[in-house]
Amino acid sequence: MKILLKTAVLSIIFFQNGLFAQDSIFQKEHRVSFQPQFFQIKEAANYGLVFNGLNLIVGYEYTKMTEQRFFSYKADLGFGANFNKGVGLNWHFKPVDLFYGFEIVEKVQKKLHLGPYLGVNYRWQVYPELQSGHMFWFSIIDMGPKVVYRLPFGNKHFRIAFSNSVVGFAARPVPATETHFYSLQFSDFFSNAHKNLKLGSYDIFNHTSFELEW
């Protein structure tokens, strides 16, 4: 089974709490953001149709930077509706997005960090008008290298991040032999998301991410 995901995100930060030392060696931030997200998905098991729509995501991020280290934790929870032949409903849950970077460029203002990341992402879709209440899902637990670059811009800064998965687990639904019955209980979202987990690398999936933040 194949699945194609394309997203575009605009983040609006509505809460930020920071602690900065006078010598700028230590920085710590808590941020909560609201993210309207354009979402496009092509699901081979859903006749290969391309659905486009809007997701609304609430995100949390904690970052801690020392003189030579950078640590970040992120989590997202979102819901949206996509449209083509009828309406598709989409849920997104990212409980874990960890990064631990080591400084590889020694400059006071410009920071370049390289290190490993670990991500856990769950996506569920339901297409009531085409597939009744049958659930589709795409789960990935992946890790790989990530680079983060902080560039000062006035009294603000740009943050550019790039990551690419190397190894992880992926889970997709297996075609059922009986299609007349389905279940959408709350427990099904978590039990289904971990069915048929397969360990692999580029032979199973590739998760590439590019972020530009101001």
Image (cartoon, grey):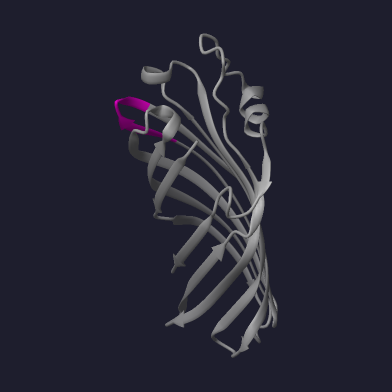
Compared to residue 41, the image places residue 214 above or below, namely below
The percent coordinates of residue 188 (x first, y second) are: 63, 23
* The magenta stretch spans residue 102: no
Residue in the picture at 42% in, 35% down: 43
Main SS of the magenta part reads strand
**The furthest residue to the top:** 180
Q: For residue 153, which quarter of the picture?
A: bottom left
The percent coordinates of residue 115 (x first, y second) are: 67, 71
Q: Nearer the viewer, residue 112 or 10?
A: 112
Quarter containing the C terminus: bottom left
Residue in the picture at 66% in, 23% down: 187
Q: Is residue 95 visible?
A: no
Q: Nearer the viewer, residue 167 or 64?
A: 167
Q: Nearer the viewer, residue 54 or 20?
A: 54
Q: Is residue 81 visible?
A: yes
**The furthest residue to the front:** 203
Residue in the picture at 61% in, 45% down: 140
Q: Nearer the viewer, residue 142 or 150?
A: 142
Residue in the picture at 63% in, 60% down: 166
Span of residues in magenta: 80-87
* The magenta stretch spans residue 83: yes
Compared to residue 32, the image places residue 188 above or below, namely above
Q: For residue 44, which quarter of the picture?
A: top left
The percent coordinates of residue 101 (x first, y second) are: 67, 72
Q: How many marks?
A: 0
Compared to residue 65, the image places residue 195 above or below, namely above
